[in-house]
Image (spheres, rainbow, N blue to C red):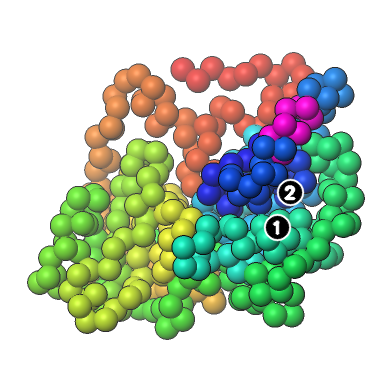
Amino acid sequence: MTMGTASTMTAIAEAMGLTLPGASSIPAMDANHARMAAGCGRRIVDMVWENLTPDALVTPASVRNAGVTAMAMGCSTNAVIHLIAMARRAGVTFGLDDFDALGRDVPVIANIRPSGDRYLMEDFYLAGGLRALMARLGARIDPSPITVTGRPIGETLTDAQVHDDDVIRPLDNPIYPEGALAVLRGNLAPDGAVMKPCACAPHLLVNEGRALVFDSYPEMKAATDDPDLDVEPNDVLVLRNAGPIGGPGMPEWGMLPIPIKLIRQGVRDMVRLSDARMSGTSYGACILHCAPEAAVGGPLALLRTGDRVAVDVPGRRLDMLVDEAELARRRAEWVAPAPHHPRGYGAIFARHVTQADQGCDFDVLAPVPGPGIPEPDIF
């Protein structure tokens, strides 16, 4: 049973077959929400008798359906981490390159931005909801994976209808023809970084600027609030040490605020780079999940204020324009930060959490151990 406002993950859950049809789109105050909750309770009891378990539902085809659906929704960047982790737990190979390929191929057709005082998802629900969107995606959705109903997902979409072509667009009239998500790589993010091209000011899709590097959120916040900060519109704001280990826990700090000096000049977007996450409702030229993160010695740790950073979203590149000899010197001088937690759960977490490109999951929990394979010892 899904609830709340995390539209990306509720959509992914339904597209993967983990909810009853239509569960992800019903607003909490709608009368159908209570009926859906009751239906979920009845169905889970039947699933126990049928021995229908998640390993039958989370398959390569259902994971890909979830990725396609997320792209069509104009999803949150958090979809990358969560879906990779879920797939990995089930032994399904699905990674950053799969997301990038879908981002180039699947148009954004859900127009669910807030309007006035209306609830974010209300218009989408009234327009037909997720079932209508998936039906409109046509052949991009594999109809064969089964859902919690025990039936193929294609059967649950046969009667879905779109009631508003502006909210759930036809494929030939999308909000964006591509670009829900893109994965950038280069000497700043050899294992990948994630951004939303569709949320980025067009002139920043290809940009070169000077780096302004901050080692902590308080340092960054103090600087961006300084009206005398030395900053230009094409500069690149960088926040590091905010990844899964550096945060710790990879907080949603990735939407760095535009410096007040630039806001007063009318600047509303600029390139921002971090090893953090950001909220699904955020926007702008924010490049996130930079991997490996700075706290483990990723290249982001070697970047310095004044270095030039080049971003090429169409070319999927993210590079610091620093020669290899200088980078080697910096790497030799780099000292790992002291651990946040030298003992206890925090130490176990830091020892076993994976990087963003692998879903920030515990390395000891994936893939699912098979017959005769014991659970690993996390200590």
Residue located beneath label 1 in the image? 129
| 32 sits to left or right of 240 | right
Residue 184's place in the image compared with 350, above or below, is below
125 versus 283 height, above or below: above
* Residue 328 in sight from this viewpoint: no
Disc 2 element: loop
Cα distance, mark 1 to mark 2?
A: 7 Å
- The front one of 125 and 190 is 125
Q: Is residue 79 magenta?
A: no
Q: What residue appears at the point 71 percent right and 74 percent down from the top-left corner? A: 165
Q: Which residues are magenta?
A: 36-44
Q: Residue at x 81, y 63 (%)?
A: 161
Q: Label 2 belongs to which residue?
A: 22
Dot 2, how many residues are within 10 Å of its Cα: few (below 14), some (14-19), or many (20+)? Answer: many
Q: Nearer the viewer, residue 309 or 66?
A: 66
Spot the residue most to the front.
31
Look at 54% across and 17% down and name the residue there.
377
Task: Write the residue at 22% across / 57% down.
Answer: 220
Q: Earlier in the sequence, mark 1 or mark 2?
A: 2
Using the rendered view, name the quadrant where residue 201 is placed.
bottom left
Which is nearer the eye, 117 or 170?
117
